[in-house]
Image (spheres, helix red, strand yellow):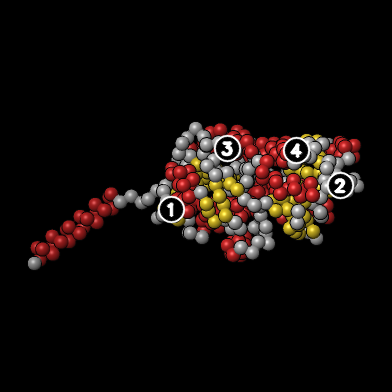
Amino acid sequence: MKKLLILFLVIVIFVVIVSLLFYKEKEPVKIGFIGALTGKYSVLGNAMVNGVLLSFEEVNYEVNGRKIDIVFKDDKQDEDLNKNIINEFLRNDIKIIIGNVTSSMSKVTMSIINDYDDMFMISASSASNEFSGKDDNFFRVHVANNTQRFDSFTNYVINNGFKRVYGIYDPYNATYAKDYLINFEKSLVSKGEKPLLSYSKTNTSLDFLVNDIRKKNPDLIIICANSVDSARVIQYIRLKGIKTQIASSEWARTPSFIENAGKAAEGVIFNIDYDENSANPSYKEFVHNYKRKYDISPSMYASKAYEIGKILLEVLEKGDETQIKRNLLFQKEFEGVQDKILFDEYGDVIRSYYNFKVKNGEFVKVDE
């Protein structure tokens, strides 16, 4: 009996030792975030970081029995730095990239990752139509600047009698900003309206800009730039006594726009796919959790980054990081915080757009 007990203990010890020798903890899921975390574009980047962290925190940074390791990098809107970061991700075997904040930097990242079949990139804000309709490794939850995306916006412009439209864009993110004006114009022209009066730039002398606006006498000015530059240009235009109606892209539609523009923000029109007054229960829960964690209200970009986190978690439940594209396209439809997110075969999404106007310091939905 004693010999049997000793034999049993020897066997147990042997099994334990072998298990310890051959046991290998599951490799973590490695995710890289790249975007503007400093400088004038950082209002988007930092909001996205907040949204991503909240989504992963809700599952204790774990999916399918694997821990999630996420690395955050600031591209500083610098092409060479951006390339170095992506190559660092590659060396560290990071297969999933969330980013970039701007379309110009996303273009740089894609020039590298599209050479690797097992890489996957998804963005919360890069909306250039240049990326549309391509079978590559880039997806996004933000709608592309295609002509159809501007349908509700140009309907609003036409229905309100705006015939002479003056465009201004940020040349440092022209991949998105000029593309925005081009496709807005295409939508107008397709409905029998005239092309834009101008494609002016935010880095132009503001006095020259004001004089050009007075000379061309538009009845609508549309600006595609970040919240800081949009606020700066609008303030100066108003300071010089120009009362022309102004519209702005969703890029600038953040709480900081109203803070920076002050009274000059009043009456500015926005056309976006996000409503901070949405009654969707999922959205209300997201806002509650976001405010509890960060003590501020989420922006559209924080919301979309949170959606990215939830989508990645859902797809990773079905396969590892090398199968994300396949599994995402197989499912196609996901629950967003406000509406359904439907991906097409090229990783672009379809979402509903609404018109808003700044009234008494708040974004208020307006009818067409």
**Which marked residue is nearer to the observer: mark 1 or mark 4?**
4
- Secondary element under disc 1, as helix, strand or loop, is loop
> Is residue 151 or residue 229 the one in the foreground?
151
Q: On the image, which quarter does residue 237 sit in?
A: top right
Q: Tell me the amino acid under the disc marked 4.
A: Val
Q: Which is more N-terminal, label 2 or label 3?
A: 3
Q: Is residue 60 visible?
A: yes
Q: Of all residues shown, which one is farthest toward the bottom?
A: 1
- Where does label 1 land, which residue? 317
Tag 3 and tag 4, C-beta contact below 8 Å: no
Q: Which is more N-terminal, label 2 or label 1?
A: 2
- Where does label 2 land, which residue? 244
Residue shown at 13%/64% (left/top)? Answer: 5
Q: Of all residues shown, which one is farthest toward the front?
A: 192
Residue shown at 49%/45% (left/top)? Answer: 329
Cα gap from disc 3 to disc 1, whole angstroms: 27 Å
Specify whether 155 is left or right of 326.
Answer: right
